Amino acid sequence: MSIQILPPDVANQIAAGEVVERPASVVKELIENSIDAGATDIRVEVREGGQRLIRVQDNGCGILAADTGALFHRHATSKISRAEDLNRLTTLGFRGEALASIGSVAHVSLLTRSASEDAGSVVRVAAGLSIASEPRGAPPGTTVTVEHLFANVPARLKFLKSATTEAGHILQIVTRYALAYPELRLSLLSDGKLIFQSTGSGKLYDVLVKAYGLEMARQMLPLETGQADEGGDAGPAEQYLNQLPTSVVVTGYIGAPALNRSNRSYITLFVNRRWFQDTSLAYGVIQAYHTMLPVGRYPVALIFIEMDPADVDANVHPAKAEVRFREGNRVFGALQRTVRRTLTDHAPIPQMPGGDSPGSLNVRQPSWDELAAWSARHDVLLAAGSGHNPLNHHSDGADNGLPGSSQSPALGAPAQPDPEAAGAAPSPDLPLSAPNMIGRKVPLLRVVGQLGAMYIVAEGPDGMYMIDQHAAHERILYEMLFTDHARQRLVIQPLLEPLVLDLSPEQASVVGGALATLAEWGLEIEPFGGGSYLLRSLPAVLNTQNPHSAAAEIIDGLAQGLDVVGGTLEARLVTLICKRAAIKGGQVLSLLEMQAMVRQLEECASPRTCPHGRPTMIHVSAGELARQFGRI
Ligand code: ADP
Ligand code: MG
């Protein structure tokens, strides 16, 4: 066949194939046009999942009668005029393709009136053939009606899913724009039923409630947008997530760790209010939850990135579903830093089921007065608790309150820990004033006792806290190891005699590729021929352990590679070391040991979850206790 230029109707259908994949794509393009037209009220109506009918009505600027003739031509647009304009897009549309594409695969009628004209016009197009443009009375704004979608494209028709599924995709699109434009009133009517409506209040939270439901919205944290405070109160593990100051502003909401999903589709990204997909940024969000989410679970996040449009290229994907950033790393860094900071500052302590708002943000924060009163009571109770001054661990300022590596096994030993071993002189006058407590991630706690050799029961300013001793100790060790490592003070325990490890090929390949990292964290291992390796040292936190089984467990864990969501090799390794070194459930602890542990946990940057993302503590509020006992 000789080469020929395809006639316009064929070319348009080809282009439509890229833009109009399913009914939801039509809805998307029409809503974008309405938003670009400055509408404040957009009504979407569909029938049979959009296949029978899609109608989008807006109160935007409308179209001048003189312009209606060109509407359904390809590259007919009022939004850009020069190639340079593509470098600074401020409208959602810009290619002038949508109406032409939709018109080539459906019957379309467009009724419009510009506010500046008395009469409106109607334009009809069927399968690419423009029928007519004629005057017609109309309110200001534009209504586009699309019928018989894909009637002339059997291939597309075949791939359409059930009406319910297609309506679901449409709902997703409508919801997305409602979230991006909370000042818009946006509604969706499907087969005569109103299935979504935003109020146009301008408040993102209001749309969030409409889109996700109150239960879910309550478990979401508003992102904190402050300027980058490098390091600051970020924990040692946080500083690990590299951060750069940028002019990229990130806002939105993220789910508390307890709100998680089995896939990453609940991570929604917008840049300058344009929805887009980006695997790498989604991964950045997941990584920011590092150690806070259980394995195989993904966060819920709604992220708005605001930045100079000149730094974003929206013209890289046929359906404009992807963008390219000029400096992707800056965006990644800003996003991850914001998410992480919000999480470490605000993730709530899980509430006992039965509380009125499980895992939610509606946990009443104790007032300043209550905190002050609690602080005084706490000090007295602590001092009364034992002959020793129980604050000695707390006062170890030089060491961030965490014991040196060589001392931490004292926690695990059943004997009473020697107060001197904690490395601090008693400081009876350490003030624990209320202002001290306000920035805390967990409140000051008074240990009441141990339950089932597994949980520490403690009292706080608002009720009871139960701490999982193993999870808490894992968290303490995890942060301690990172601190020690950063200060190059990690204590390594050489073995008296090297141990021979016989590794499976899989284990050997993991170990072989990680010798330097392993050594840096105290596991000095060298090849000894074949699958054999020599173990020469262990991190000192493991020095009460059987070295052979400790090393085997850690190497096994590394080879499985599943221990932490989105973890680096190092983070995984440290998590495994901590898991092994931490005291186990079933171990009876003395009051002093429990107090030491609680103090250390209070000092942690992320005290509420263990490095695997499970909670370290649960809270039963005083109110909940009173309710359960029928006092209120
Ligand atoms: P683009 O949005 O890329 O410009 P479209 O094919 O979607 O291309 O629309 C072509 C033109 O039609 C737009 O540039 C705009 O001028 C006009 N238009 C389309 N829909 C509307 C609307 N709802 N209100 C006002 N003008 C509209
Ligand atoms: Mg458009």
Image (cartoon, rainbow, N blue to C red):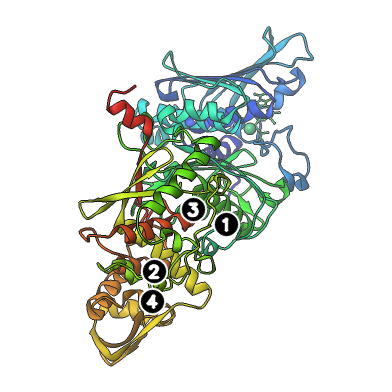
Q: Is residue 385 left or right of residue 487?
A: left
Q: Position of residue 103 (x, y in %)?
A: 57, 28
The residue indicated by pointer 2 is 419
Label 2 to label 4: alpha-carbon separation: 14 Å
**Kind of residue sitting beneath label 4:** Ser
- Crowding at dot 3, Cα within 10 Å, few <14 / some 14-19 / many 20+, comes out as few
Q: Are marks 3 and 1 in contact (CB under 8 Å)?
A: no
Using the image, determine if residue 165 lies above or below residue 194. Answer: below
**Kind of residue sitting beneath label 3:** Thr
Residue sitting nearer the eye, 537 or 223 = 537
Q: Position of residue 598 (x, y in %)?
A: 39, 55
| SS state under label 3 | helix
Q: Residue at x 46, y 33 (%)?
A: 364
Label 1 vs label 4, nearer the camera: 4
Q: Earlier in the sequence, mark 3 or mark 1?
A: 1
Q: Earlier in the sequence, mark 3 or mark 2?
A: 3
The residue indicated by pointer 4 is 406
Residue sitting nearer the eye, 110 or 286 = 286
Q: Earlier in the sequence, mark 1 or mark 4?
A: 1
Residue sitting nearer the eye, 471 or 143 = 471
Q: Are marks 3 and 2 in contact (CB under 8 Å)?
A: no
| SS state under label 4 | loop
The image quadrant where one finds ligand 1 is top right
Label 2 to label 1: alpha-carbon separation: 28 Å
Residue sitting nearer the eye, 290 or 38 = 290
The residue indicated by pointer 3 is 279
The residue indicated by pointer 1 is 233
**Kind of residue sitting beneath label 2:** Pro
**Kind of residue sitting beneath label 1:** Asp
Q: Position of residue 497 (x, y in %)?
A: 27, 92
| SS state under label 2 | helix
